[in-house]
Amino acid sequence: MASMLRLPSLLSPSKPLLRRRLPAARLAASAASRGQASAATGAAAPAATETRGGDREGQVTPRSVDFNAWYTDVIAAAELADYGPVRGTMVIRPYGYAIWEAIQDYLNVKFKETGHSNMYFPQFIPYSFIEKEASHVEGFSPELALVTIGGGKELEEKLVVRPTSETIVNHMFTKWIQSYRDLPLMINQWANVTRWEMRTKPFIRTLEFLWQEGHTAHATLEEAEKEAMQMIDVYTKFAYEQASIPVIPGRKSRVETFAGANRTYTIEAMMGDKKALQAGTSHNLGQNFSRAFGTQFMDENGQIEHVWQTSWAISTRFVGGIIMTHGDDAGLMLPPRIAPIQVIIVPIWKKGDEKSAVLEAVDSVQKLLKEAGIRVKVDDSELRTPGWKFNHYEMKGIPVRIEIGPRDVTNKSVVVSRRDVPGKQGKEFGVSMEPSILVNHIKGRLDDIQASLLQKAITFRDSNIVDVSSYGELKEAISEGKWARGPWSASDADELKVKEETSATIRCYPFEQPEGTKKCFMTGNPAEEVAIFAKSY
Amino acid sequence: MASMLRLPSLLSPSKPLLRRRLPAARLAASAASRGQASAATGAAAPAATETRGGDREGQVTPRSVDFNAWYTDVIAAAELADYGPVRGTMVIRPYGYAIWEAIQDYLNVKFKETGHSNMYFPQFIPYSFIEKEASHVEGFSPELALVTIGGGKELEEKLVVRPTSETIVNHMFTKWIQSYRDLPLMINQWANVTRWEMRTKPFIRTLEFLWQEGHTAHATLEEAEKEAMQMIDVYTKFAYEQASIPVIPGRKSRVETFAGANRTYTIEAMMGDKKALQAGTSHNLGQNFSRAFGTQFMDENGQIEHVWQTSWAISTRFVGGIIMTHGDDAGLMLPPRIAPIQVIIVPIWKKGDEKSAVLEAVDSVQKLLKEAGIRVKVDDSELRTPGWKFNHYEMKGIPVRIEIGPRDVTNKSVVVSRRDVPGKQGKEFGVSMEPSILVNHIKGRLDDIQASLLQKAITFRDSNIVDVSSYGELKEAISEGKWARGPWSASDADELKVKEETSATIRCYPFEQPEGTKKCFMTGNPAEEVAIFAKSY
């Protein structure tokens, strides 16, 4: 197995395996829609598909036919994840995990630049801790997994498998913080968390998931507020600049605020089916946990005060958000900055005497790009045809494909294809192999794709947000699957009524607000802000 | 808070807090042995020590007085870890976690270079899985934590919180592997694991710990054996070259082999109290798990076979090994390659008019070293005296200290002190600030320290291994706290007898074996190998 890429054994020709059976009709529709692809993979034995999964690459449900089926098919076919043996759990496969690693690599640097240190808290939390903060226990107790037996014995106190760590963090902060000199205390941990969800969906909502959770303690409310805003800003920049996802940052309504927070900030992303995805949150916890846990400090005047806190998190759910924002009928589509492999090189030859010259050229192009810091992989396997490979790496969402055949070798050029522009339009012939030209060309294409994915997602988002000035207009927008944005100052009860009648919730009061006076579309009363309503994951 | 270092908020002057109370006698001994240090920290209020931990830096038990007390004192004083609220759990604090991150950074690269991909398996394992492999269940069932309640309901099947992942890995491998083309399958995960240990010790043995676990499947026994050996070799190189720990690699005895493995390879390290620490293991699992889970593949001849497997792990225990190998009475001592901070710069001035010139020089030296890729931190806090800082950063084990005072500024030079050479001997005056000279000097010192720590540990190790040719000699060596090495071909029962009578176990049959014929020191029968016996953690 070649080891020229950052993630060597990641793209072996092994089989995608989410085991949901596809109905025959969908299979037919899918095969028909792909033509060449199904032909290329026609050799796969149908019997294997039945019994052990088998090669299903030609069998992805078109996105337009059934978005949810498409989503799980892509996860299987691109080998991003598989179902674990316990209901609602997920195995994150190497290719899916590599996307998570790209997210980690970026955020880890940003967290450290903004003054946070990584550390690790135990995942077992005494049950009594969860009960200490009233709204926290209310929010989380239905979702808890409890350890009741340890080392063969019934435990005296049940242990909660962490659903989030505010309680245990505060228990420790209380030990570590005495004086204003110990503040701010700013930490982060990368960890697994468990929430006993009833309806699960790979990446989006699973019994166990991976995340980072930041926790900070400050001497003043203002500092905590600034920190909570700073971190939602880090997430927003990450979403736009790395993931090409034009999230809308804003504040949650009271109803939707985190159990234990005074304010929750969120980034809301519009998926390809127009449903909203809460992609990251940052909470101003006020003194709720510090009062529950007695986390106090002596200020500069010798007064004892409770600390002001924040917490903030992004999880593996974000990987689901990337899939559902950019993917198309051909599969996954990855923004170059977080793509584990940015360029796939496919050598093409027919006669044996062409092979060595082609492979030599492939090798030198690979070296060249690698030295330029581009994540590149060559697939020179002879087990698969070039056509199969084209489809395979499109399914994997690799941003750029380079083909090199005998004529290209003669012409000292290559063929470059963009994943985001289908067919001939995305294909450039005769791109010079001359090192500086080729490197600049590929870097330019990667930048183009990064920007183009973002622009496409912005256009899609903006054409699917409707400004409403009455409840009737909201209902209409929501029934069309769109987001509704309108002035809102009605009650929590009204908000719940909207949810009951339309399935839409307030996703956020966006930070970006229109100017001028506003009237609540529900009550007609004056409103200070517009809110965005949408159905969500 | 300054953010010039890799881990910005890591070294705030907050308080060390392991809450074990020190007996008065030990406190006195400790204070007496440190002189200047205790004076420097004399300002800390004794009342605070009683109630909330307080500043205990002057109160570390000398290593020679009580090794175990010294160990936990250093962990507290250097802020490496703290006890979690659940018995036997540990909070890994930023400085301790940064050492773990250095271990991760190195190994992650090596794992990928050797063809492994990271991924993630769920931590909840159906109880029935654990029962499938007979010796595995026998080995692990006394140590399991079980989830019996989820989402408010009693579960139909208890879930095991992973103590290790062979079972769930094999369950998934069975789905993913069909053909020899799917092999080798080589993956790794960084994860938390839970073992319900009764006697715990920070880093060394905790209820929950962090580790990486590699899992691979191969077509032949030979390939699996080669992989198991390759990975113990990666661990050995890591220990020697990064951690300056001269581990002895070898094979475990049958009695000490991992529950479910055919062969276990190990790296055994000698701690400062001469007890052995098993610092990493690599298992050739044979077909034990593939038979239990039906993990089969079709070979090139169309035959169905069970795969051959390995697993291998290193955990946060290794951090404990670093502390106990290199630390001394003054605290932690970190090998430069894994030190989160390699150089601490302490500015020194008395008169206000000296300050700006000193800080300017400090700043330029810091920039210089940082640009040269050296992990450097400046402590220009005016809350603490230079003397306090010297002791503090010695406690933290930072390899090199640079002092810059007014006279140094005038002379365009600095003072360089090595952590590993106490007193004046380790101090160099008048080291030129001229960029290339200073950078080379510091790099050279870091290399010297790295090599010197290893050499010191080798000398210590070799002077404490006794070659024995009778059981009597073994007993004598073990009673002196040393390791005993001698020819061994006796029974498992004899091995258990040795354990019962001396508390020593076979740590390994070292790979490096003496030549010539051997006679078992226990039975007098011919022996093929020498074994190393020792008391261990």
Image: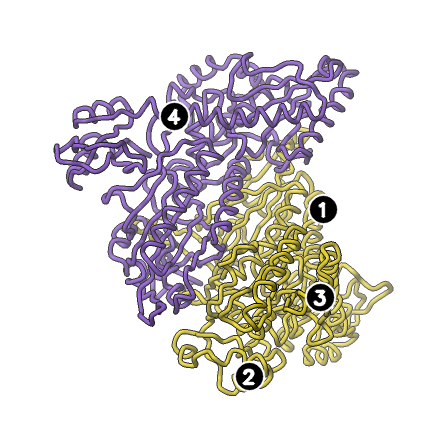
Chain colours: A yellow, B purple
The disc at residue A411 is 3
- Nearest the viewer among A142 and B504 is B504
What amino acid does circle 1 point to? Lys
Q: Which of marks 4 and 1 is in front?
A: 4
Image coordinates for residue A218, horizontal then vertical, percent = 65, 40
Image coordinates for residue B4, horizontal then vertical, percent = 68, 34
Who comes first in sequence, dot 1 or dot 2?
2
Query: Would you place residue B225 above or below residue B480 in this image?
Result: below
Distance between the alpha carbons at the discs numbered 4 and 1: 47 Å
* Left or right relative to A91: residue A420: right
Q: Quadrant of the C terminus of chain B?
A: top left
Image coordinates for residue A114, horizontal then vertical, percent = 68, 43
Query: Would you place residue A41 above or below residue B415 in this image?
Result: below
Q: Mark 1 points at which residue?
A: A226
Residue count near mark 2 (Cα–Cα under 10 Å), binned few <14, some 14–19, many ≥20: many
Q: Name the residue under label 2.
A: A31
Residue count near mark 1 (Cα–Cα under 10 Å), binned few <14, some 14–19, many ≥20: few
